[in-house]
Amino acid sequence: MAASRTQEAVAGPTLFDLMEPEPSLGAAPAGPPASATITAPHGTRSPKHRAAAPPLAGGVRMDAVSPTVMRNSARKTSPAPPVRSTPGERPRGKPAESEPAGPDAPVSTLPELPARRTAKARPEAAAAGDGRGSGVAAVASQEKSERRAARTSGLGEDEPVARANPLEAARRAERRRLVTAEQLAGRQRDISVSEFFAKNRHLLGFDNKRKALLTTVKEAVDNSLDACEEAQHLPEIHVTIDQLAEDRFRVTVRDNGPGIVKKQIPNIFGKLLYGSKFHRLKMARGQQGIGISAAGMYGLLTTGKSIHVTSRTAPSKPAHHFQIQINTAKNEPQTIKDEPAEVAWERGTEVSIELVATYAKGRQSVDEYVEQTAIANPHAQIYYKSPTGERREFPRAAEDLPPETKEIKPHPYGIELGVLMKMLKEAKRVRLAGFLQQAFCRVSPRVAQEICTQARLNPESRPADIGTHDVEKLYQAMQAVKIMAPPTDCLAPIGVRNLLAGICKEVKAEFFTATTRDPAVYRGNPFQIEIALAYGGELAKGDTDVSAAEPARVIRFANRVPLLYQQSACAAYKSVLDVDWRNYGLSQPSGSLPIGPLVILVHMASVWVPFTSESKEAIADYDEIRKEMKLALQECGRKLAAYIRRRKRQRLEADRRNIFERYIPDVAEALAKLTGASESRIVKQLQAIAHTRTAEADMELDEEGRPIRDGRPIVAAAPRGGRVAAGSPRPGGSPTATDVTAGLRPGRPDAETDELTGDESVVIVPENEAPPSPGELFEPPAPASNGKRRARRRRS
């Protein structure tokens, strides 16, 4: 029976013959054996078929053992440890007569393959007494020792299986890698908005330590200015930065605003996306309700310290001091301390945040931010103490608050389809026509009826009953019907007067000009663009950040807030590049800023500034916004070009005068000899003639480059046929009134209108002096000379 279950390998070595033995089990060295014998399971190919199969390299026959037998044997039993046969010893499972005897007996390097266990084979195998039970125990013991060794060496428990059957080990690993839907469902959970921004704080402007310090000061100052303006208080801001360690600072900002009620303090400073400005269409510095609470969260993450808030609402009420932390997992505030406090100021709020940061001067620093804030907010008084102990005061340049803005409703052109569907579902006890009039601005009964007619909807239908298809038709009709632009009383631009007052206070130049464009609309949101230019003066001496050989400096503002980062991504910067400054007397490389001592200020005022990110560092590139900025820059550029040409003429006239004065002594001496007159008298007369011919070199110009007579800017339109007595006409030769300064000289402001262009400007007239009459400023037209009449007669 045993002979029927075994076969000799007569066709050469098989795949099992080439398997290397385990070194730890004392296997014989590898090498081609003289002869080898294996136990062939049931179903193996016959020797005839093996002989017909083509051999592989080295005489290996792949069909000696079928893959099915290999898998079955690996699944049913583990491989027995290889045993080195000694001379004269018979391997188990082999008949004695099948192997040679003597010292040249072959060494078996492979474990024997057990025969397929059938009902007939089991009793015979038990009766044979071949020691199979002890072999199984040895295999189990070997597997156990291998698993222990694998755990010790860092290998997995499947290492023995991988050695015996790599395919099975790969299948087990693949099954472990597969994840079921139930496992995925168990991993799902809510993500708090504060938890998201704690991991992605770069979106809020906390990219690095230097920027984190600037963002913290910016958010606190913006909140203070907004609170003071809403309460109609002239802002007085105190900014103090104390350095506690090499990279640790404490930022303290205090204002004289209306204060904050006690129950609202934890939510305002300890909860993200909590505020009063997100749902209002009204010009304000803050919009999202993130800034100051995000600064407190950054301080908590970097130092572990709470944000300290002290607020007082009236002199008769006590102040309250809070220590607040933000729970990032729930986006909720945690009040660490709540106690009354004694303060010296009557009302206002003081915020103190400790954070890890870096302080440095120069561009994109806290110092630059405070300076630019003073330019855009000339009505604010700012006291600043830097970490180095330096104290600076930015005095108030205007005593008037910005005009109070009003909240407006959304415009139909600025609504989106999803928002419209939400508004229709929330509308109650109103008809469709009434809903359009109540929910949107500039929608009159006639416009509402026209919208319903074009959408083919009943004006008396209920908004909540309108289906999705009808809502889409209603939305398309709202975009197609011609509707008046939204109101602009929601905007509070800086104004030409205050804009020039602010830039003159901080920038030392010789020429200033500014303009404010009429309100425009983008996506239904009103906005207004303001531009100011400063040229020459100390900017050309190299004492400041801008010199004559460097590109112009661009200062960007959005709702009076300086934008210091991401300049190249901002629409304001791109609009400056769109202007061809070579037409205005400046050099400009292709695709770059103009070269020269020039400062360009760009301000955008809007109910909803389209920032490129939550950090509010750059204005998005909308065609309507970019067009308005370019037009405003071109308008100021024309004034700058007129000033540059006038200054150039003055330099040329001064050079001519120097040439005349150089030769006056010699000419006077020669004339005195010829005429016998006094030489000194001739010199005086020649000098008078030279000054008359070059009078433009002595012309005094105001800060906008316009000629001044007797300390007053010339502001009147020339009468028909007249010419300007002092100064030169605008390019092109047409006589016109000079542009006027705005808030640069002491005196009372008077509004003047250019009769030719219709431009309105602000004129500063000295106190107790009446403005000059047109007769004092302009000379009557000169009659045609006889020489011109004779020339016309010859041509005729």
Image (tube, helix red, strand yellow):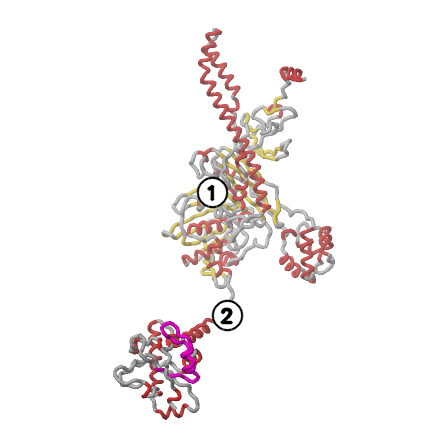
Magenta segment, prevailing SS (helix, strand or loop): loop
- Determine the residue positioned at 61% across, 22% down: 779
Residue 451 image offset from top left, x and y in percent: 71, 53
Ranked by sequence position, the earlier of labels 1 and 2 is 2
Q: Would you name the residue on which mark 1 appears? A: 371
Query: Which quadrant is the C terminus positioned in?
Result: top right
Task: Give left or right: position of 631 versus 13.
Answer: right
Q: Residues within 10 Å of mark 1 (few under 14, many from 20)?
A: many
Question: Disc number at residue 184?
Answer: 2
Q: Which residue lies furthest to the top in this view?
A: 676
Mark 2: secondary structure: helix
Mark 1: secondary structure: helix
Q: Which of 663 and 55 is in front in this view?
A: 55
Task: Please say if 691 is above or below 343.
Answer: above
Q: Distance between the residues labelled 1 and 2?
A: 53 Å
Residue 14 image offset from top left, x and y in percent: 37, 77
Looking at the rendered structure, the number of numbered marks drawn on it comes to 2
Q: Give the range drawn in magenta.
A: 37-65
Q: Is residue 140 visible?
A: no
Task: Please say if 449 is above or below 655.
Answer: below
Task: Give left or right: position of 457 versus 491.
Answer: right
Query: Which quadrant is the N terminus positioned in?
Result: bottom left
Residue 690 image offset from top left, x and y in percent: 50, 18
Task: Give left or right: position of 418 versus 61.
Answer: right
Task: Please say if 647 is above or below 76.
Answer: above
Q: Do the residues labelled 1 and 2 touch (CB within 8 Å)?
A: no
